[in-house]
Amino acid sequence: ALRGREAKSEAAAADAATAPMTPVPETPQPAAAEVAALQATAIETAKRADAILARADELRTRADAAEARAAAADRRLAAEKRDRDDDRSKAAAAAARLEDALAAAERRVAELEGERTAAADETVRDLEAQLEAARRDA
């Protein structure tokens, strides 16, 4: 039996050696170097994409921080403007009070001058009356 199988095997090998070969279409096989270069390019591209994404995240974080600083500055400016407006209104009120006080002081000075003038006039009349009385007695 072993011989029979060997014979059949040898016959099949002889038939295969003499039979016309069916052409197998050749598919282009990339060279190992080309595959390695493509893999390296893909890896490098992925690294660059990761770097770009990391940079974008960093820029987004910086932009958010800048927006927060700008908002804080806007709030600070608004508060300073309110303070200035309050200071201006307080200064205007103080100026109005000072003007009122000055007007009152001027009125009082006028009153005092009037009283002094009236007192001086009365004193002059009294002195003139005394002088007249002294002349009559003399």
Image (cartoon, helix red, strand yellow):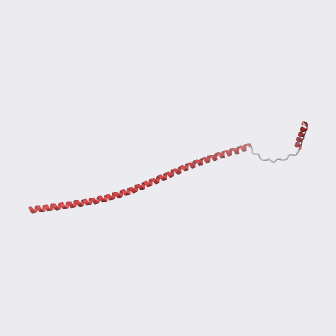
Which residue appears at 31% of the width and 58% of the height? Answer: 102
Front residue of this view, candidates 53 and 18 = 53
Q: Quadrant of residue 18?
A: top right
Locate residue 136 relative to residue 109 in the image: left or right: left
- Which residue in the rendered view is the most extreme toward the top? 2
Locate residue 39 relative to residue 132 in the image: left or right: right
Classify the position of the C terminus by image quarter.
Answer: bottom left
Locate residue 5 relative to residue 119 in the image: left or right: right
Locate residue 109 relative to residue 64 in the image: left or right: left
Q: Position of residue 2 (x, y in %)?
A: 89, 36
Classify the position of the N terminus by image quarter.
Answer: top right
Front residue of this view, candidates 47 and 104 = 104
Q: Where is residue 27 in the image (x, y as percent from the top left)?
A: 78, 47
Which residue appears at 59% of the width and 48% of the height? Answer: 57
74 vs 43: above or below: below
Q: Where is residue 129 in the image (x, y as percent from the top left)?
A: 14, 62
Front residue of this view, candidates 83 and 19 = 83
Front residue of this view, candidates 35 and 50 = 50
How many numbered marks, from 0 up? 0
- Which residue in the rendered view is the most extreme toward the left? 138
Q: Where is residue 103 in the image (x, y as percent from the top left)?
A: 31, 60
